[in-house]
């Protein structure tokens, strides 16, 4: 019924769509085909695998938290306040998207490293150095992932009818109250979607992490780093590690999607 | 310095032009009248060869107008993996025999690899050696942050050997994926020391000092080079390997701090 009403799916759209899907899925198939299933249990139990997985999940979650705390207000500022240079600020927010992650890592070192602009002050005043620490991993991941959250939340904010906020204001709500009680519940799905994107990007982060936080098992060696190093010696081990990361992240994303995102 | 490099370059160009004139080792596919080597050579070389091979590549190009050498510098183990996965490389120069064996073992080499240089570890410290590091034992002092290479890459394997020989138990802050990454952590001041090759500290002598230590004698790396079986440009590849092994190539390597095999 609906199908007839809308007509047939045009081939000019269907063909590239199927090709696009194949392009995205085939590499995963390649991974599955090459997986050494017979030695899988031993490889899963290999030392360091669990530690790397735990570290990956922990750091990606903390980075997402950091992004929400800083990124939602930033998105609100960009969507609601008309200040001079807003377009420039919006462009700046997306810089980590286009920046090669390794360059991002170097840039972070130059600012937050032991001799960095802020890092040297952190070191001399508090004795805190971020590079080569788990906190450094969180910082690197948050730097790379935050634009995803800001863009998603800003889009959601722009899609919300501002009359609700105006109504709240006429009823005497301050801007903060209106944000907390009206705006935030309205954009919650957008925040959730942004957070999931942000988390996924943080989980797969490699370049900025290895540059800024280094690579040490149990402390800064996340799964992508473990995969890269395994690749240097043992292709099968690298495949198994990739598979674990893939399965865990897909499982988490799928469960979150059902719970948070598609639910209106 | 520049003058002498220029002289070497010119000498190399003349010598090779003369050589190829009589020998005619390579029939150029595109009918140029000069019988020098033409075409592109893609060389996969260990990160520690970055400076010396870049120089040798330039010399080779000058000696063979119409040729072009493209390098991919990375940790030897990553390069070996890429080659075994079918990367279109012509030449592989590894920083250790083990990574070369990965390639020869998979049947991807054309002939037997030749050792063309040897390298030794030193402790790279920031210019002026602010933490007064004089040997491996000093690396375990509290407050000294050390970067090592991961054991998968040759500089990491050599570092492990040297540390074991000295019975020094060391916990580094990071295990880098190639020697240049370890060195850059010293340059940036993020670590106080790193175990790298003597050639690396020589190449970065404006930023770092190299501290020699006796145990490095037990962990010397041999650098093998080979033409790959599926090399797309085999003739030019062979000419490049010959050039590396020639007196001209050796001179560049020695100047960079490599030892003769």
Image (cartoon, coloured by chain):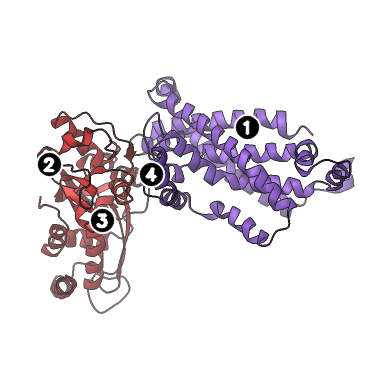
Chain colours: A purple, B red
Residue at horizontal 49 percent and vertical 32 percent from the top? A56
Circles 1 and 4 on the same chain = no
- Total marks shown come to 4
Tell which of A13 and B28 is nearer to you. A13
Q: Chain of mark 3?
A: B
Residue at horizontal 84 percent and vertical 47 percent from the top? A161
Q: Earlier in the sequence, mark 4 or mark 3?
A: 4
CA–CA distance in space, label 4 to label 3: 37 Å
Q: Earlier in the sequence, mark 3 or mark 2?
A: 3
CA–CA distance in space, label 3 to label 2: 20 Å
Q: Residue furthest bottom?
A: B33
CA–CA distance in space, label 4 to label 2: 38 Å
CA–CA distance in space, label 1 to label 3: 46 Å
Q: Chain of mark 1?
A: A
- Residue B54, percent from left and from top: 26, 62
Discs 1, 2 touching: Cβ within 8 Å: no
In the rendered image, the vertical position of residue A42 relative to residue B99, given as above or below? above
Q: Secondary structure at mark 1?
A: helix
Q: Residues within 10 Å of mark 2 (few under 14, many from 20)?
A: some
Identify the mark at residue B207; answer none if there is no mark. 3
Q: Which residue is mark 1?
A: A253
Q: Earlier in the sequence, mark 4 or mark 2?
A: 4
């Amino acid at each position: 019924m609906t199908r007839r009403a809308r007509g047939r799916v045009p081939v000019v759209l269907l063909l590239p769509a199927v090709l696009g899907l194949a392009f995205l899925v085939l590499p995963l198939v390649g991974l599955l085909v090459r997986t050494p299933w017979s030695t899988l249990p031993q490889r899963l139990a290999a030392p360091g695998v669990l530690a790397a997985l735990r570290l990956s999940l922990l750091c990606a979650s903390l980075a997402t938290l950091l992004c929400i705390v800083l990124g939602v207000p930033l998105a609100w500022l960009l969507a609601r306040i008309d200040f001079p240079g807003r377009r420039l600020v919006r462009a700046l927010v997306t810089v980590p998207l286009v920046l090669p992650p390794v360059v991002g890592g170097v840039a972070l070192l130059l600012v937050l490293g032991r001799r960095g602009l802020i890092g040297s002050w952190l070191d001399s005043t508090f004795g805190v150095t971020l590079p080569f620490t788990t906190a450094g991993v969180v910082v690197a991941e948050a730097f790379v992932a935050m634009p995803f959250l800001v863009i998603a939340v800003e889009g959601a904010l722009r899609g919300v009818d501002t009359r609700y906020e105006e109504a709240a204001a006429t009823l005497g709500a301050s801007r903060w109250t209106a944000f907390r009680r009206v705006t935030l519940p309205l954009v919650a799905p957008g925040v959730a979607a942004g957070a999931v994107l942000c988390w996924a990007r943080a989980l797969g982060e490699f370049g900025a992490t290895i540059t800024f936080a280094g690579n040490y098992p149990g402390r800064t060696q996340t799964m992508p780093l473990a995969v890269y190093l395994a690749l240097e010696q043992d292709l099968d081990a690298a495949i198994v590690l990739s598979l674990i990361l893939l399965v865990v992240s897909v499982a988490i994303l799928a469960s979150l999607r059902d719970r948070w995102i598609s639910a209106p | 310095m520049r003058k002498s490099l220029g002289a070497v370059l010119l000498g190399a160009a003349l010598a090779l032009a003369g050589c190829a004139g009589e020998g005619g080792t390579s029939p150029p596919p595109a009918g140029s009248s000069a019988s020098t080597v033409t075409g592109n050579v893609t060389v996969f070389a260990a990160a520690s060869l970055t400076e010396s091979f870049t120089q040798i590549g330039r010399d080779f190009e000058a000696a063979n107008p119409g040729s072009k050498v493209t390098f991919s510098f990375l940790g030897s183990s990553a390069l070996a993996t890429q080659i075994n996965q079918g990367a279109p490389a012509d030449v592989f120069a590894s920083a250790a025999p083990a990574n070369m064996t990965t390639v020869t073992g998979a049947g991807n080499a054309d002939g037997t690899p030749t050792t063309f240089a040897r390298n030794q570890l030193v402790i790279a410290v920031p210019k002026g050696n602010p933490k007064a590091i004089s040997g491996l034992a000093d690396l375990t002092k509290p407050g000294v942050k050390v970067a090592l290479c991961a054991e998968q890459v040759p500089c990491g394997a050599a570092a492990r050997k040297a540390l074991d020989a000295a019975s020094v138990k060391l916990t580094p802050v990071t295990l880098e994926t190639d020697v240049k990454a370890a060195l850059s952590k010293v340059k940036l001041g993020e670590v106080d020391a790193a175990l790298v090759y003597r050639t690396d500290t020589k190449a970065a002598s404006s930023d770092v000092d190299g501290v020699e230590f006796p145990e490095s004698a037990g962990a010397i790396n041999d650098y093998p080079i080979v033409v790959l079986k599926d090399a797309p440009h085999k003739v030019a590849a062979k000419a490049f390997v010959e050039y590396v092994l020639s007196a001209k190539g050796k001179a560049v390597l020695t100047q960079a701090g490599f030892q003769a095999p």
